[in-house]
Image (cartoon, helix red, strand yellow):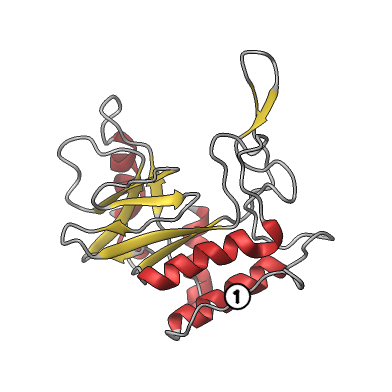
Amino acid sequence: KAILEVMLEMRKEGRKVPYMVFWSGANEDIGWGVVDITYEEFYKDERYKDCWVYWEGKPLHLVTGIPAEHPKEFTIRKMGGLNPMPGVSEWSFLNITNVPSRDEDGYVEQMCVCVAAQETYMTEPTAHGRNHGIFFYEQWKRAFKFRPKVITITWWNEWTAQRFLDEFGNSRFVDNYNQEYSRDIEPMEGGHGDQYYLWMKQYIKAYRNLEECPRLVEEGY
């Protein structure tokens, strides 16, 4: 709620403000309970009606699963990761090869674009690192090829690491592991600085202007 209030305040000041999308848990066990709560607490409040991303005439709500009889107040899209064959209207935030997600009519609706990706864990040899910006470029190149309506860029502010232990007591990291094996676009002190942020801006500008995909990688690669 604090974020929404700040958004309203900034808009009154004439500032550009992004729009918001909730990404909520939903499955056959818990049903639509979390989505219902967000509707009652936020979406019913008319003050926030211009804060949402709208899709197909309704506020867009991303969910982790789709139980039966979804709420009619929203346009619902399931959002997941590492799915090489997403179903109809099933969006993705992470894929090693970013494949298009299509709507019910077969049109390309959404694709993810990632800085890096893992097959299982970022600490495993199978992980795909930044590779001097080449991984990011290859993902953008595919997005330029398919021209989806929505591109989900992964990721911002991933410096919080999640450490897991396997059955042998070995450490595993799903997301951020180190500078190379993380998806963080947020500028950092030292390291790659604001390079990925600047590349992201250039890719977005070229995409919106219907230009060819630029090849933005570190010098010499």
Give the left or right position of residue 23, taking residue 125 as reference.
left
Is residue 14 among what the camera can see? no
Which element carries disc 1, helix, strand or loop? loop
The single residue placed furthest to the right in the displayed view is 190
| Screen quadrant of the C terminus | bottom right
Looking at the picture, how far across and down is residue 1, in whole percent?
A: 47, 52
Looking at the picture, how far across and down is residue 132, in whole percent?
A: 71, 62
Q: Classify 10 Å Cα crowding around label 1: few (below 14), some (14-19), many (20 and above).
A: some
Q: Amino acid at mark 1?
A: Arg
The residue that appears at 63% across and 72% down in the rendered structure is: 199
The residue that appears at 32% across and 36% down in the rendered structure is: 26
User: Which picture quadrant has residue 143?
Assistant: bottom left
- Above or below, comparing residue 137 to residue 41 in the picture: below
Q: How many marks?
A: 1
The single residue placed furthest to the top in the displayed view is 168
Is residue 204 among what the camera can see? yes
User: Which picture quadrant has residue 110?
Assistant: bottom left
- Above or below, comparing residue 34 to residue 202 in the picture: above
The residue that appears at 47% across and 85% down in the rendered structure is: 211
Q: Which residue is mark 1?
A: 215
Looking at the picture, how far across and down is residue 84, in whole percent?
A: 39, 45
Give the left or right position of residue 177, taking residue 92 as reference.
right
Looking at the picture, how far across and down is residue 18, in whole percent?
A: 48, 69
- Residue 20 or residue 107, whichever sits in front: 107
Give the left or right position of residue 195, taking residue 94 as reference.
right
- Residue 18 or residue 6, whichever sits in front: 18
The residue that appears at 57% across and 42% down in the rendered structure is: 118
